[in-house]
Image (tube, rainbow, N blue to C red):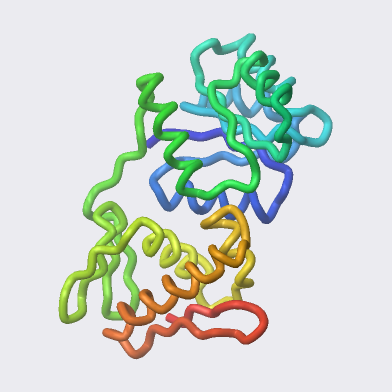
């Protein structure tokens, strides 16, 4: 299981990203204070560092310099809202291996993390067929992305899988529609909003096999997954 040191001071965003990465098989240690990161890094010895650039007390570029003084090989991925070319260049100059602009989708973040781990020979997350979630009478197998227990097994797409996992992690809670869009697509554009409607409809059709499972629409707010 690959370990990630994830540095982010936006608490809500950090919680979503941490949970999403853990659901994909990573071990994630999250730190909010830039001044504490180096000591956490020395204790954890992570397989990869994912650093927000704008942090309190010490920014991501300075943290990267300190990490590089200790470890020349560990991959570093920067996350930032900065879009200027000079900022991107500075990220690579300070020892970064990759650079992802905010807002970003979880799909892209996971692909970039896996690519960096493969390039450096670090272990990618390992799962086995025991990794499954019980949803009423249904069972969802995470590695295979298969929902079973109904009339037939259903192979979910990547996006359907991410949405189902997000709803499951926040089950029996009211979830703001925008929070889903930001977590899974990286922005709440009209196009992505319509895509969300399509995927919600698909998941509802899959979950009809068990009447105890519902995705309720909370008008003007979002959804509530009842299980």
Asked if residue 199 is positioned above or below residue 127 in the image, the reply reads: below
Image location (x, y in percent) of residue 219: 63, 86
Q: Residue at x 49, y 75 (%)?
A: 197
Whether residue 139 is situated above or below residue 227 in the rendered picture: above
Q: Position of residue 139 (x, y in %)?
A: 27, 70
Residue nearest the observer in this picture, 44 or 177: 177
Is residue 99 left or right of 34 when viewed as pictured? left
The x and y percentages for residue 120 are 40, 19
The quarter in which the C terminus is drawn is: bottom left
Circle count:
0
**x%, y% of residue 213?**
39, 83
- Picture residue at 53% right of the left edge, 49% below the top: 105
The residue drawn where x is 35% and y is 34% is 124
Which residue extends farthest bottom? 211
In-front residue for pair 73/33: 73
For the point 73% across and 30% down, which residue is it?
A: 84
176 on left or right of 125: right
| Quadrant occupied by the N terminus | top left
Residue that protrudes farthest toward the right in the picture: 57
**Position of residue 166 in the picture relative to residue 209 (left or right):** right
Q: Residue furthest front?
A: 191
Note whether 82 is above or below 45 in the view shown.
below
User: Relative to the observer, which residue lies in front, 163 or 20?
Assistant: 163
Find residue 87 and report its image quarter: top right
**Quarter occupied by residue 135:** bottom left
């Amino acid at each position: 299981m690959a370990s990630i040191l994830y540095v982010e001071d936006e608490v809500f965003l950090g919680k979503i990203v941490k949970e999403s990465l853990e659901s994909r098989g990573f071990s994630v240690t999250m730190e909010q204070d830039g001044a504490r990161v180096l000591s956490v890094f020395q204790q954890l010895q992570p397989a990869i560092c994912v650093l927000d650039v704008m942090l309190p007390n010490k920014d991501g570029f300075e943290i990267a310099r300190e990490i590089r003084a200790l470890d020349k090989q560990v991959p570093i991925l920067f996350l930032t809202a900065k879009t200027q070319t000079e900022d991107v260049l500075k990220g690579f100059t300070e020892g970064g291996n990759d650079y992802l602009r905010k807002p970003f989708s979880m799909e892209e973040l996971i692909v970039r993390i896996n690519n960096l781990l493969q390039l450096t020979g670090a272990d990618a997350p390992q799962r086995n067929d025991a990794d499954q979630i019980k949803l009423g009478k249904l069972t969802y197998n995470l590695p295979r992305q298969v929902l079973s227990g109904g009339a037939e097994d259903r192979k979910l797409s990547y996006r359907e899988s991410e949405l189902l996992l997000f709803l499951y992690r926040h089950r029996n809670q009211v979830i703001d529609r925008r929070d889903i869009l930001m977590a899974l697509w990286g922005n709440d554009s009209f196009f992505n909003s319509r895509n969300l409607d399509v995927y919600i409809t698909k998941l509802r059709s899959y979950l009809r096999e068990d009447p105890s499972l519902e995705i309720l629409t909370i008008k003007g707010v979002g959804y509530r997954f009842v299980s």
